[in-house]
Image: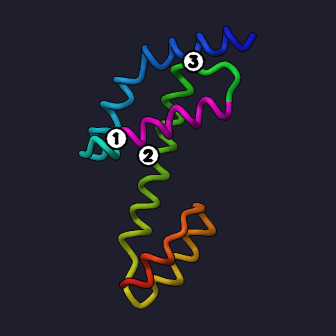
């Protein structure tokens, strides 16, 4: 059964990675960010479903883009006066420790 899932995942990746990457690149304008977003999209599908397919990829991409947009919006609202408090919130919400960077502001 595991070989079958592995084969299905490999086929899904071969068939759809370039399309997902192109959509991510169109959204981000940066190849590195697009690659990260495409990887996140595939990881979401593979982590949550035993039978991944293209429809699930499209849904995962939509949610990855929404999450990215929310993170970007939150990041853009930061001001130096409340950076440390927001860095603590960010760490709690997303698991990324930004406190060292915040103390340099």
Q: Quick one: 8 or 74, which is closer to the camera?
A: 8
Position of residue 70 relative to residue 16, above or below, is below
| Local crowd size for mark 3, using a 10 Å CA cut-off: few (<14), some (14–19), many (≥20) | some
Earlier residue among tags 3 and 2 = 3
* Residue drawn at the location 34% of the way across and 23% of the way down: 18
Instruction: Give the side of residue 16 with respect to residue 5, left or right.
Output: left
Residue that carries the numbered disc 3 in the rendered image: 9
Q: What element carries label 3?
A: helix
Q: Quadrant of residue 48?
A: top right
Residue that carries the numbered disc 2 in the rendered image: 65
Q: Is mark 1 on a helix, strand or loop?
A: helix
Instruction: For marks 3 and 2, give the one nearer the viewer.
Output: 3
Q: Position of residue 74 (x, y in %)?
A: 44, 68
Quadrant placement of the C terminus: bottom left
Instruction: Give the side of residue 5 with respect to residue 12, left or right.
Output: right
Earlier residue among tags 1 and 3 = 3
**Residue furthest bottom in the image:** 81
* Residue drawn at the location 39% of the way across and 29% of the way down: 20
Q: Where is residue 51 in the image (x, y as percent from the top left)?
A: 67, 19
Q: Quick one: 64 or 18, which is closer to the camera?
A: 18
Image: magenta residue range: 34-48
**Residue furthest right in the image:** 1
**40 inside magenta stretch:** yes
């Amino acid at each position: 059964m595991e070989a079958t899932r592995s084969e299905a995942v490999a086929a899904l990746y071969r068939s759809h990675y370039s399309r997902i990457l192109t959509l991510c690149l169109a959204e981000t304008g940066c190849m590195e960010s697009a690659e990260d977003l495409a990887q996140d999209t595939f990881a979401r599908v593979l982590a949550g479903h035993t039978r991944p397919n293209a429809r699930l990829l499209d849904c995962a991409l939509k949610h990855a883009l929404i999450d990215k947009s929310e993170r970007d919006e939150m990041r853009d609202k930061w001001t130096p006066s409340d950076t440390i408090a927001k860095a603590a919130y960010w760490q709690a919400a997303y698991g990324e420790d930004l406190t060292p960077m915040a103390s340099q502001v």
